[in-house]
């Protein structure tokens, strides 16, 4: 089993910053990609940022220049530095990891979600 544990959410004023962390643990052989998705009330879950094992990253247009994803491969941990936050960034942020177990089976796991609230 692979588990993801997120931390770092909270309440911040517009223009402020937060840093989210997500640590993966368990039966991990390798992780191909880790990412952050978010879901606002009444909306579908959407990609915010994703980072691949080779270092490539993708961002949603709405967060480019404000959110930065990074990864510590040795710790199987992904971070999301969020600056210049806007009220529209308010959502539950979910961590995701895809990879393989030592038995070469694939996994696609989600964290429990962490609330980010940006007040105007």
Image: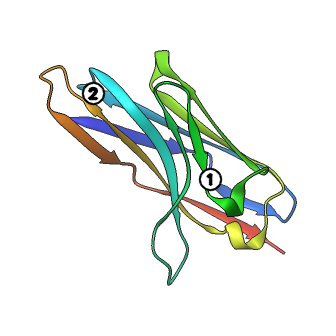
Q: In the depicted view, which residue is nearer to us: 49 or 72?
A: 49
Q: In the depicted view, which residue is nearer to us: 26 or 31?
A: 31
- Point out residue 79 in the picture as x, y percentages from the top left corner: 60, 37
**Disc 1 designates what residue?**
9
Cα–Cα span, label 2 and label 1? 23 Å
* Horizontal relation, residue 106 to residue 22: left or right: left
Q: Is 34 placed above or below 93 here? A: above
* Horizontal relation, residue 27 to residue 19: left or right: left
- Point out residue 10 in the picture as x, y percentages from the top left corner: 66, 57
Q: Which mark is residue 26?
A: 2
Q: Quadrant of the C terminus?
A: bottom right
Mark 2 and mark 1 in contact? Answer it, CB < 8 Å: no
Q: Quadrant of the N terminus?
A: top left
- Point out residue 56 in the picture as x, y percentages from the top left corner: 56, 33
- Displayed quadrant of residue 60: bottom right
Classed neighbour count for the residue bearing mark 2: other residues with Cα under 10 Å, few (<14), some (14–19), many (≥20): few
């Amino acid at each position: 089993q692979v588990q993801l544990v997120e931390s770092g959410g909270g309440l911040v004023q517009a223009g402020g910053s937060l840093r989210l962390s997500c640590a993966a643990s368990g039966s991990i052989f390798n992780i191909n990609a880790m990412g952050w998705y978010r879901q606002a009330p009444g909306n579908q879950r959407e990609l915010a940022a994703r980072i691949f094992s080779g270092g490539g990253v993708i961002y949603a247009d709405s967060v480019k220049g404000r959110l930065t994803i990074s990864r510590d491969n040795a710790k199987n941990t992904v971070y999301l530095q969020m600056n210049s936050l806007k009220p529209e960034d308010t959502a539950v942020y979910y961590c995701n990891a895809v990879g393989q177990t030592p038995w070469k089976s694939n996994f696609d796991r989600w964290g429990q979600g962490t609330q980010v609230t940006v007040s105007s």
